[in-house]
Amino acid sequence: MKPNFEKGNGLLSVILQDYKTKQVLMNGFMNEEAYRKTLEDRVVWFYSRTKERLWKKGETSGHIQAVKEMALDCDQDALLIQVEPKGPTCHLGTQSCFGDDFFNLQTLEKIVDQKVGNPQEGSYTKYLTEEGTDKILKKCGEEMTEVVIAAKNNDSTELVDETSDLLYHLLVLLKNQDVSLKDVEDRLGERHGENLSYKVRGEIEEW
């Protein structure tokens, strides 16, 4: 399925989204050449309406946007690109052009990944990963018990706190077992979800 450039007078509206955290990073525009170069280079190219030229995102800062997945909307005139940002996306130095007031489970997973990959002295995540699987499992069991107790006591505040602790420890466990949150999401999607977006086929599948 191909993008429809005619609706936008030769341009396609494009949204970049962090493929791990799902944070919306920026909006831009592509013409057909920018779209083709994005497919070829696997990094995002845009068309500047003010300068009337192609430009590669990050060509000056070095903060390129590596393409992970692309999907067209139902009208085929808007494109969502899942990217791995190689640094802040916004020229103001923030991760997103829409501000950095953003947090979800994928953000926490990214933090866990960073703490495991770059362990700091005194880090609790470092302690857990060094202790190994049995210690992580023990903590997961303890936190699950705390969740059960909070629920039995009908204590919603405590339930939120203990569930937060449990989710953190589960993410550490997934990292320890080399399983990503996306692996879990994909399995849940197979069981319960329905993909309503139109994937960009053809060139993408040849990657």
Image (tube, grey):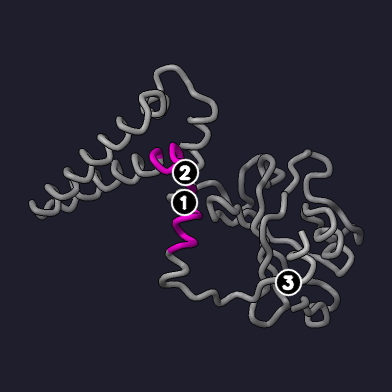
Give the residue type that dot 1 points to: Leu
Residue assigned mark 1? 181
Mark 3 belongs to which amino acid? Arg
Label 2 belongs to which residue?
109
Horizontal side of 80 relative to 45 (left or right) equals: left
Mark 1 or mark 3, which is nearer the start of the sequence?
1
Residue drawn at point x = 62 percent, y = 42 percent: 94
The magenta segment: 172-187
Residue at mark 2 to residue at mark 1: CA–CA distance:
7 Å
Does the magenta stretch mainly form a helix, a strand or a loop? helix
* Alpha carbons under labels 3 and 2: distance apart: 29 Å
Q: Which of the marked residues, 3 or 2, is nearer the chain's N terminus?
A: 2
Q: Is residue 177 magenta?
A: yes
- Against 25, residue 88 (above or below) is above
Q: Residue at x 50, y 54 (%)?
A: 182
| Quarter occupied by residue 40 | bottom right
